[in-house]
Image: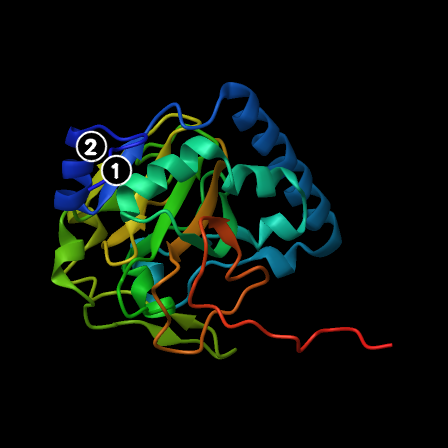
Amino acid sequence: MAALKFLTSEQKQFWKENGYIKLTNVYSLMEVNEISDAYDELFERKHRENLAGLESAWAGEDMKKAAGYIDYSVKSIHNLQMHNAVFIRAITQPNLLDALEDIMDTPDILLHHTKAHVKPPKKGAPYLMHQDYHYFPHKKHTMLAVFLNLDDITPENGGLAVYPGSHKLGPLTDHGLVDEKGQQYHYVDPEVYPLSKAIPVSAKRGDIIVFSYLLLHGSYLNLSSKSRRMFLLQVRAADDEPTENVHKSPCQGLMLRGRNIHREATMANRFTH
């Protein structure tokens, strides 16, 4: 194995055993401030344009029960790199890509998508325990998430919760549902894997949490007096491929580092004179 670029050998072992890892000092304070400012500006602008269109809380009785039947909410924007170049810099930051090389055992790292969630105070929606696998399954299971915290996170403000080592279980039975609009929500049986028995992962502003898309994870209701902000990057190895034609996003397939020797050359969009 090549020498590690960012992780220590102990961190690498923790990743293998647990399916997630928290990292500090990936982004500088200046970079975190730049991302935070661009993030706030984008949400404020889109809030003015179409507040209803930002709602992305899950539906269903299981969710209502988890939220204590309050009027829960979470606001979301996808593909932030299409809105502001700050997010291009965020997803191509050298320390981040060094860390991902160590975690993924490959220099060839490909973008799947980005998104952001804001959990409003007092009613920020929880998320039931789930595997991201069910949203975009891949053959080699190299897909992982990079969770950049733009605020300190704790269970009180709707922070992340995980079942350490659950990535080793492989894909689990989907217990989700489809709402009246055709939107799918994927999660595992909340009686078998309740949010209450998960392990909270607290983190400071600027810390990142990386986890396998097979790791069981969810998050708590935000009961604090402040919003909780998160920016998420989803990546995979270039030699992996989807098993279903789902979850297509702008810039999907963009090489963040390395090369993609499996991509076919095409002239389909060539201009003719």
x 26%, y 33%: residue:
4
Q: Position of residue 54 (x, y in %)?
A: 60, 56
Horizontal placement of 200 versus 17: left or right? right
**Pointers 2 and 1 in contact (C-beta within 8 Å):** yes
x 32%, y 45%: residue:
220
Identity of the residue furthest to the top in this view: 29
Which disc, if any, is residue 145? none
Instruction: Indicate the quadrant containing the N terminus: top left, top right, bottom left or bottom right.
Output: top left
Check the image and report above or below for 233 versus 224: below
x 31%, y 65%: residue:
133
The answer to whether residue 14 shows anywhere in this view is yes
Marks 2 and 1 sit apart, C-alpha to C-alpha, by 7 Å
Q: Is tag 2's residue or tag 1's residue first in the polypeptide sequence?
A: 2
The three-letter amino acid code for the residue at tag 2 is Gln
Which disc, if any, is residue 21? 1
Query: Quadrant of the rendered structure where residue 132 is?
Result: bottom left
> Which residue bears the numbered disc 2?
11
Q: Residues within 10 Å of mark 2 (few under 14, many from 20)?
A: some
Secondary structure under badge 2? helix
Q: Position of residue 88 (x, y in %)?
A: 59, 43
